[in-house]
Image (spheres, grey):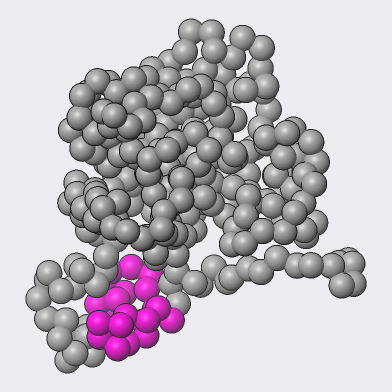
Amino acid sequence: MATAGAPRGFCRCACFCSENLYVARYGLHVRFRGEQQLRRDYGPILRSRGCVSPKDFQQLVGEDEALAPEFLAAAEYSRSPGADFEGLLQRLETVSGEKRIYRVPVFTAAFCQALLEELEHFEQSDMPKGRPNTMNNYGVLLHELGLDEPLVTPLRERFLQPLMALLYPDCGGGWLDSHRAFVVKYAPGQDRELGCHYDNAELTLNVALGKAFTGGALYFGGLFQAPSALTRPLEVEHMVGQGILHRGGQLHGARPLGTGERWNLVVWLRASAVRNRLCPMCCRKPDLVDDEGFGDGFTREEPTTVDVCALT
C-alpha cells in the first residue's frame, strides 16, 4: 500500500504511441497500429485533406522513412505471440554471445543524413547548449532539439522495449520506463576518443549516424564489477545507420578517430524497477534527490521485483 502523502511518479498509458495521435498537417486525430490499418480507417478523409500521393502518405507514416526494415522486422517479431530469444537472434547480428553484444540496422541512410543536417544547424546556432554527458564535450542532448518526445520515447516504447525484453530480461529489458538520449561528436581538434567507462543505464543503444570517418572503433571489456574486466577487449567497428546493443555495466570506450567526423546517437535505457533497488553508479540503494524530467531514471514508488544483471 502506498504511504499517504508520498510523492508519486507520473506515468502515461501505453496508448500514447498508438491512439488518438494528432496529425497537425491534416488536422486529424488518428489511431495507428500499422500502415494497412491507417489506410483502411483513414484513407478517404486523408485524401480529402490533401494526403494524395504515395510520398505524402510515406511522410505521414514517418517510421518507414526513419527506421531500417531490419529493425522494424526485429521489433515486430519481438511483439508477436510466441516470440523467443533464439528466434530474435536470427534477426540480429550477434557481435559477442559471451558479452551479450548485438548489432542491428536502426535508421535509414536518408534519416541519418537528415538528422545530421539538423544537428549541424543546431551546432552553428546561438541557442544554449548543454554537454551531452560528463565525458563528451561535443554533441547535443536530444531534448534540446525537441526530439526526445517525438523520436526517442516512441523508439523506446514501441520498438526497443519488446526487443530488449527478449535479449536482456535479467537487466530490466521488459521494464524500461525512461531514458537519456544524446548525440556525441568526434572530430579533429575536438573529442577524438573516449576512455573506458560504463553507462548510467541498464541497457544502451549506440547508433553511428556518420559522417565519413576512419578509426574510432568501440572496444568492450567485461562488466565493471568483475575482476580483470578489461582483459582481451573486443573491438567493434561502427557502421553508419547500425546500432550496437549492450548492457550499461559493460566496460567500453572508443579508440582514437583517424580521419573525418563521427556522430553517434546514444540512448541510455533505464528501468526504475531495477535501479530503485541498486544505483548502477555507486552500487548502493539510491539516496533520492528530486529532479526534472526523467532525472536519472529513479522513482520514489516501490518497484516491481526484478533481478539485476548477474556477473556472467
Indicate the position of residue 168 as horizontal and vertical percent values: 56, 38
What residue is shown at x 30% (from left), y 82% (from top)? 24
What residue is shown at x 45% (from left), y 69% (from top)? 17
Quarter of the image for the C terminus: give it: top right
77 and 224: which is toward the camera: 224
* Residue 185 against residue 52 in the figure, above or below: above
What residue is shown at x 36% (from left), y 60% (from top)? 127
Looking at this rendering, what residue extends furthest in the left direction? 53
Indicate the position of residue 196 as horizontal and vertical percent values: 51, 22
Quarter of the image for the N terminus: give it: bottom right
The answer to which quarter of the image holds residue 104 is top left
| Magenta stretch encompasses residue 4 | no
Looking at the image, residue 274 sits to the left or right of residue 40; the answer is: right
Looking at this rendering, what residue extends furthest in the front direction? 126
Give the extent of the magenta segment. Answer: 20-41
Indicate the position of residue 278 as horizontal and vertical percent values: 75, 39
What residue is shown at x 74% (from left), y 48% (from top)? 276
Q: How many marks?
A: 0
Indicate the position of residue 229 as horizontal and vertical percent values: 59, 14
58 and 208: which is toward the camera: 208
The answer to which quarter of the image holds residue 202 is top right
Looking at the image, residue 263 sits to the left or right of residue 147; the answer is: left
Residue 22 visible to the viewer: yes
* Residue 150 against residue 121 in the figure, above or below: below
42 and 4: which is toward the camera: 4
* Residue 169 against residue 224 in the figure, above or below: below
134 and 47: which is toward the camera: 134
Residue 218 visible to the viewer: no
